[in-house]
Amino acid sequence: SQLWRSHGPSMLMSVRQDHLHPWQGILAADESRPNKTCGARLKSIGVENTEENVHSSRSCVHRTWLQRGNILGVIMYEETLYQKDKNGKPFVQIINEAGAVAGVKVDTGIAPLPGADDEGYTMGLDGLRERCQEYYRQGARFAKWRAVLRIDSKGLPSDRSILANATGLAQYAAICQECGLVPIVEPEILMDGDHDIETAAAAAERVLVAVYDALATQGVLLEGTLLKPNMVTPGVDSGIKATPETLPIFTCALLATVPAAVAGISFLSGGSSEEDASLNLNAINAIPYERKPWALTFSFGRALQASTLKTWGGKDENIARLRRCSLSVPSQWPGKYQGSGQA
Ligand code: 13P
């Protein structure tokens, strides 16, 4: 296709599978400001949600993780793409000098889905082409768009919400590719609820089938995309905890809906603790399931940032401590991987 001729080779260079390993992934540091996401993160560590504190926290998270050598890309909130750290160095340059790629969240949040019962769709398509062109000029090479779906006992996510969100993701992905950005396709199904893991797997299957149908309809080059799904877990209110035994089986079975052409799958952490998210990713990679043609890695937000932010605690003098400590990454990660050779 025209798209492939114009952008395919450069996009494939950005997402070559041999660049992706389970212990090398993406840092999601794109919490929206000034709305509640940034505020909630800072509040949890007793720090006020001011512009300066947000800037310092982002600087701290970037530096802490980039120097560890396992971050291939950083997803930024739009304003960070234009900002410099306290020494006057642009964040994009810091990321690139660490051998990583700068990315940007391009959606503009969630709105209520008309006629639906407490479901939403993701906004941001208006003017997206022009914004993506500008982000590319500013140094971004990949983008993220988060669709949010939820499960309830009455059968949500609804077909209407699945279709609306899948279509939005596909239109976003097509525009990104036109502008030379690799789209991360993120259909997040929230952990909220008291459902069991089978219900979560069934919902995820419905969503992913619709997403790949929509991506095909919009002519998106799958080789130049990454999928960012949630791991398949029981609802947080179910009283059942996903274990490294059950979670990978359901998650890997679900991945049968993902075409082999997709360059990589980088899981979100969705509110799991740092340790749980890491152990679960390790278990997913270790499962002896031969049909895993993609790199299976991470694109964690909370599960990379929680300890870092807690140790920083709003005081830049604590950043030196972060350079020394090993945070709470469990010893298994990065560790020995068994199984299908995906590691
Ligand atoms: P979490 O890993 O905290 O879910 O965040 C990842 C993300 O980018 C959500 O859009």
Image (cartoon, grey):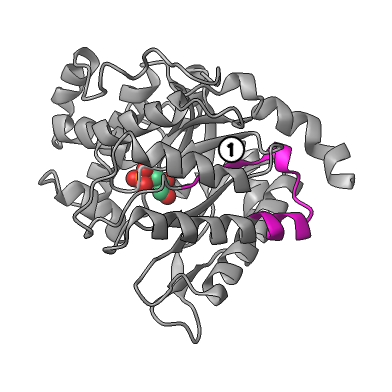
The location of residue 199, given as percent across then percent down, is 40, 60
Please, is residue 3 above or below residue 92 in the view? below
* Residue lying at 41% horizontally and 82% vertically, measured from the top left: 117
Q: Is residue 314 visible?
A: yes
Q: To which residue does mark 1 refer?
A: 140
- State the residue lying farthest toward the left: 46
Q: Examine the structure image and report whether residue 223 is included in the region drawn in magenta.
A: yes
Q: Is residue 93 left or right of residue 210?
A: left
Extreme residue in the bottom direction: 115
> Residue 55: horizontal and vertical position, in percent?
30, 40
Question: Looking at the picture, how far across and down is residue 59, in whole percent?
Answer: 32, 32
**In this view, 175 is above or below 337:** below
> How far across and down, in percent of the image, does residue 102 sit?
53, 33
Front residue (pair 317, 11): 11
103 in relation to 10, above or below:
below
Depth check: give the residue in front, 105 or 261: 261
Q: Is residue 90 visible to the viewer in this orientation of the structure?
A: no
Dividing the picture into quadrants, the one containing residue 141 is top right
Q: Secondary structure at mark 1?
A: loop
Q: Amino acid at mark 1?
A: Ala
The magenta stretch is 212-229
Q: Quadrant of the N terminus?
A: top right
Q: Is mark 1 within 8 Å of ligand 1?
A: no
Instruction: Examine the rendered structure and indicate whether residue 148 appears above or below residue 161.
Output: above
Instruction: Give the residue at x 44% y 39%.
Output: 249
- Quadrant in which residue 94 is drawn: top left
